[in-house]
Image: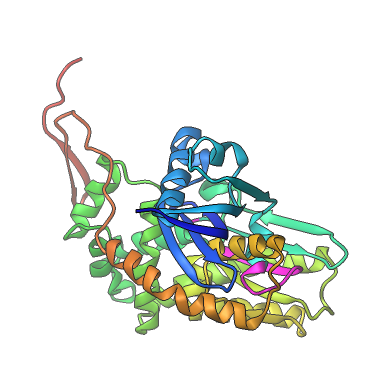
Amino acid sequence: MSHRYDKLALGVDGGGTKSDAVLINESGSVLGWGRSGTGQAFWAGRKAAQEAYAEAIRMALGKRRPHAVWVAGVHRSTFDGMNLHVSEPHFVECRELSMGLAMALQTHGLLVLSGTGAFVAGQKENGGTLTLDGIGPVLGDHGSGYQIGLMGMRAAMASSWAPERQTVLGQLVPQGLGVSTLEDMFSLVYTQGIGRSHIASVAKAVIRAAEDGDSIARKIIVQAADDISDVLAHVIRRLCLEDSDYALVASGGIAQNSEMYWGRICERALEIAPRLRPIRPKVRPCVGAALLALKAMGVAWTRKLLSRIEKTQQPHLAKLEKSEEAVPPLAQKSSRAINLEYTAHGPWLRGDIPED
């Protein structure tokens, strides 16, 4: 049986690894949450990205059929093609910068986003904006989950080379990728479809090891934080915000979940602009989009509203996190009969390769 609601806000965020959609009513109660694959067409392709958005939105709506819904974070054409039977959809302009700042109930300030990818952006009170980085793992994404994951994988492979390179990452990183040994990880990298999001997923293991005191993992986290702090410094100086008291907002899984990483960024930023107000929100970017939708609906932003969202989102997040405990599937192995092994003398490729 479907449920009718008069007015709801739908916030959508398409990240480098996953897409989130959240449904919130006027009082700030989270009614539904959906999650699917990446919504970034550059990585997944336009069709796959649209399907990811659609799946996340359908999950968030469930059986609810709101009479009117304010939608932020997804293009009208994607939403219209889903046949959701919403009588009055209203579309709200929403960018990553504005939804990130909205997580902290801000309309201007500085945003440091580090998830699978990374960028830094700022918006001045007079409307001036600047965004630096966000140009992908090869050319940029300084301080991203991908950078941390790749550095963690390299450190793991080198952990037996010398006493000073020993790190618990030698055990944690393969486990995080769903394999047993470093040799398995070597084979995984070179013979299977391991990609950007899987490498970025290793960042969780690196963060955990750093928090537990592993010196190699700590160096990786500090290096990544310093790299994105350098980008932040450029944004601060180019926008002339050295004397501002703007909010400095964390966004993305790395910036919001690693206290060590965020603490280092704040330390570096406050050396340049000591009046900045660091904020690490307890909500996800899709909630920032929903807050923009609520504002367009006429709902005032208050701490009470945000607190209710923070409280009522917990059961939904707990359910999603439980379902994601398993390592995501990789692409299928090549059909060629290849057996790639890593030995003390380097990679060894053996086995027959059938002729075409």
**Residue placed at 84% from the left, 79% from the top?**
243
On the image, the x and y values in percent for residue 254 come to: 48, 68
Is residue 150 at all visible to an observer of this figure? no
On the image, the x and y values in percent for residue 141 come to: 56, 55
On the image, the x and y values in percent for residue 175 come to: 23, 64
Is residue 347 at all visible to an observer of this figure? yes
Is 331 located above or below residue 238 in the figure? above
- Asked whether residue 110 is drawn in magenta, I would say yes
Is 64 located above or below residue 244 in the figure? above
Tell me which corner region of the image, top left, top right, bottom left or bottom right, holds residue 288: bottom right
Find the residue positioned furthest to the right.
126
- Asked whether residue 294 is drawn in magenta, I would say no
**Residue placed at 28% from the left, 40% from the top?**
331
213 displayed left or right of 74: left
Tell me which corner region of the image, top left, top right, bottom left or bottom right, holds residue 27: bottom right
Tell me which corner region of the image, top left, top right, bottom left or bottom right, holds residue 101: bottom right
Q: Quadrant of the C terminus?
A: top left
Residue range corresponding to the magenta coloring: 102-116
**Depth check, front residue: 301 or 235:** 301
**Residue placed at 72% from the left, 77% from the top?**
247
